[in-house]
Image: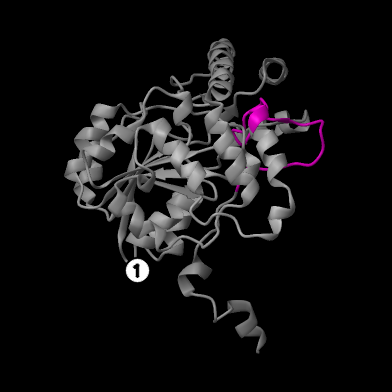
Amino acid sequence: MSKQGADTLPFVRPDVRAMSGYVPGEQPKGDRIIKLNTNENPYPPSPRALQAMTDAASDALRLYPDPMAGDLCERAAQLYGLEPDQVLAGNGSDEILMMILRACVGAGDRVVYPVPTYSLYETLVSICGGVVENVPFGDDFVLPVDALAALRGRVTFVCNPNAPSGTVTQLETLRALAPRLDGLLVVDEAYGDFGSVCATELIAEFPNVVVVRSFSKSFSLAGLRVGLGFGRAAVMRELLKVKDSYNLNRASIAAATAALEDIDWMRANVEKIRLTRERLRGALADLGYSSLPSETNFVLARRHGENQRAVYDALRQRGILVRYFATPELSDALRITVGTDEEIDALLAALKDICG
């Protein structure tokens, strides 16, 4: 192969060569870092989940896992008031999103969502050859319903609560949006357990609603990669056609099932995070940062018109990681994961020193 051919990789799809891959938050090594950049839960998972994962590490690992994750889907169906055939398990909620796009979006099909939001959507749409249509949020991050409906996408994503703003769209607004769409409405509730809205009740009302949830944030199981999708049984059957055969391993299925059976453990951790979150918002205000009310496990702290890259770098030098987005819409903001009270105290002390 010529040097030119090797450089251009002609065997790779042109649209893949042209796209930018998703960049996850930094995952540093070492235990001297205060990690407030990827919205992980600072508290441990349920002891029952840990025990179930340990028990799954047996001779049975030589056998394939249940391809349907039946125990997990049945327990989730009970918890959310659905039937098991309305639940689909994925290798993280990101895989559920990918299944949806595989099943619904082909070359040139339009996918719609408001921005700024979860940036992985753009990457997944590009992989499928779809076309992204963005609708800007206003400064208040109120969902632009009319603009979203007018674009008539094959899929419309609503991250709720939204990342990175932390703001929530009420159920009545989603109920008004769903019947105005020709395609699927995907309500991404990765942070739903920290908020006040759950859209699963819309599934009975609208055939084009799918709700996605994650075990990474509220259940403290980010390392196991488990997510759930909820929708009409007919929709789930189509998504199953594009699912990887054995997409969840035995340990993940066992731990996630046990976590649902010990739901009070998760809820207690969520309540601690909520209390720390509100304390953090108040302290940030004292330091000159503004933030919208958050219903997630993070806060988007802004100094309007003041680029925060230097603050991000200064925190990093002190061993404190937060998330900085080098985009015009968010360059004056830092997204801060709600850690333990001790971690937040260290962050605030560093910010006070940095900001004078």
350 vs 68: above or below: above
What residue appears at the point 41 percent right and 27 percent down from the top-left corner? Answer: 167
Q: Position of residue 99 (x, y in %)?
A: 43, 57
Where disc 1 sits, the SS reads loop
Q: Quadrant of residue 66?
A: bottom right
Pick whichever, 307 or 224, lies toward us. 224
Q: Is residue 29 magenta?
A: yes
Q: Is residue 311 magenta?
A: no
Horizontal side of 248 relative to 352 (left or right) equals left
Q: Position of residue 310 (x, y in %)?
A: 66, 32
State whether residue 311 appears in this view. Answer: no
Pick whichever, 333 or 52, lies toward us. 52
Q: Position of residue 327 (x, y in %)?
A: 50, 42
What residue appears at the point 24 percent right and 52 percent down from the top-left corner? Answer: 183
- The quarter in which the N terminus is drawn is bottom right
Horizontal side of 309 relative to 204 (left or right) equals right
11 vs 331: above or below: below
- Bounds of the magenta span? 24-48
Horizontal side of 220 relative to 162 (left or right) equals right
What residue appears at the point 28 percent right and 50 percent down from the top-left corner? Answer: 184
Horizontal side of 86 relative to 118 (left or right) equals left
Pick whichever, 232 or 117, lies toward us. 232
User: Seen from this angle, which residue lies furthest left?
Assistant: 180
- The quarter in which the C terminus is drawn is top right
What residue appears at the point 82 percent right and 30 percent down from the top-left corner? Answer: 32
The residue indicated by pointer 1 is 107
150 vs 295: above or below: below
Q: Quadrant of residue 5?
A: bottom right
